[in-house]
Image (cartoon, rainbow, N blue to C red):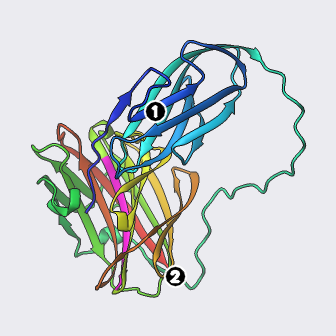
Amino acid sequence: MKNAIRLLITTLGLAGASFAGVTVSSPAPGSTAGSPVHFVASASSTSSTHPITAMRIYVDNVSVYLVSASKLDTSVAMAKGTHFVVVQAWDSSGAVYKTPLNLTVSGTTPTPTPTPTPTPTPTPSTLPAPPSSAITKSNIDQMTGWESCTVCAGADGNGPVATFSMVQNQASPSLDGKSIKFSISGTTPYSDALWWKQLGAADSATNFKYDIDFYITNPGVSQALEFDANQSNAIHKFIFGTQCNIKGGHWDIWGNAAANWVSTGIPCGPPEAFKWHHLTWEFKRTSTNVIFVGFTYDGVTHYLNKSYPARSSRVHELNVAYQMDGDSQMHAYSTWVDKVTLTYW
């Protein structure tokens, strides 16, 4: 159904050249500047069908600026001294492009006193709670009737074959004594496995909250972990597809009708091993569009409010899905999933 991510990293150190990748017009590599430092950069993809979706500036391996665009023009306050800077971009396929440079900051450049602005309203720290009328399907991981595939999980629904398995009612590791163990291995690079549980039709639902806890022992060999919900009302199919693109280092969402991954620019590296991680996604839909409202991962909330056109469908369904992607060497690994819940209204 979706592409396994082939991570493309283009590292280029020359500013001002024309190429697919990141071009930094200012500052020049090895230059000296006063703080705040003025950054001007642009990025282009190697593919005309996968445009740049986000750019980020890292100073000494710390993210200091993010924009959902293929260009940036901003000033960054930096301490006096020598710094290692990386300007990075992502395209809609998940490919990553980088330009590193060393920079010396001489001191602070005087700036006019800014005009005071009103204090903004704080962003909520949690996603909105569902109403009392919402329907909740709990412990979906304990339900019978899970379905699975491997070929359908790959590019255009016709990917390579992986070896995979699912075993329910695992006492350990578990949060409630009944987790599911998912495993994947194989010989073909970037093979995937997908599991899903149909919950029956819910054509009138327009709001969805997907809760899941997961556990992994060897996160370094996972290409990506995918967490999905899907609804079809015989007119449109609404794919609420999300993934922690572990090798790419960021969260992605699914472009639906365009059938492509779109990087959010929000970091998601290898999850800590031997630890339960809690993830909550909230989605909405209109009559024709999918809306990714936001998510909370291990207590940190991010708001997206990204919308994409849905695709056509002739079926009625509501389901949750989980996918594991293999890496370039198809290292064998397992994950455990527990307390899977879908709330909708």
Left or right: 113 in relation to 48? right
Q: Tag on residue 345?
A: 2
76 versus 45 height, above or below? above
Q: Which residues are magenta?
A: 224-233
The answer to whether residue 154 is visible is no
Query: Circle 2: is it few (<14), some (14-19), or many (20+) Cα within 10 Å?
Result: some
Mark nearest the camera among 1 and 2 is 1
Q: Amino acid at mark 1?
A: Val
The answer to whether residue 289 is visible is yes
337 versus 77 height, above or below? below
Q: Element at badge 2?
A: loop
Q: Tag on residue 261?
A: none
Query: Circle 1: is it few (<14), some (14-19), or many (20+) Cα within 10 Å?
Result: many
Front-lying residue, 180 or 227? 227
Q: Report the residue at 42% width, 69% height from top.
A: 341
Front-lying residue, 175 or 246? 246
Q: Position of residue 80 (x, y in %)?
A: 70, 14
What is the distance, in whole Å, between disc 1 and disc 2 at their CAs?
43 Å
- Where is mark 1, residue-wise? 22
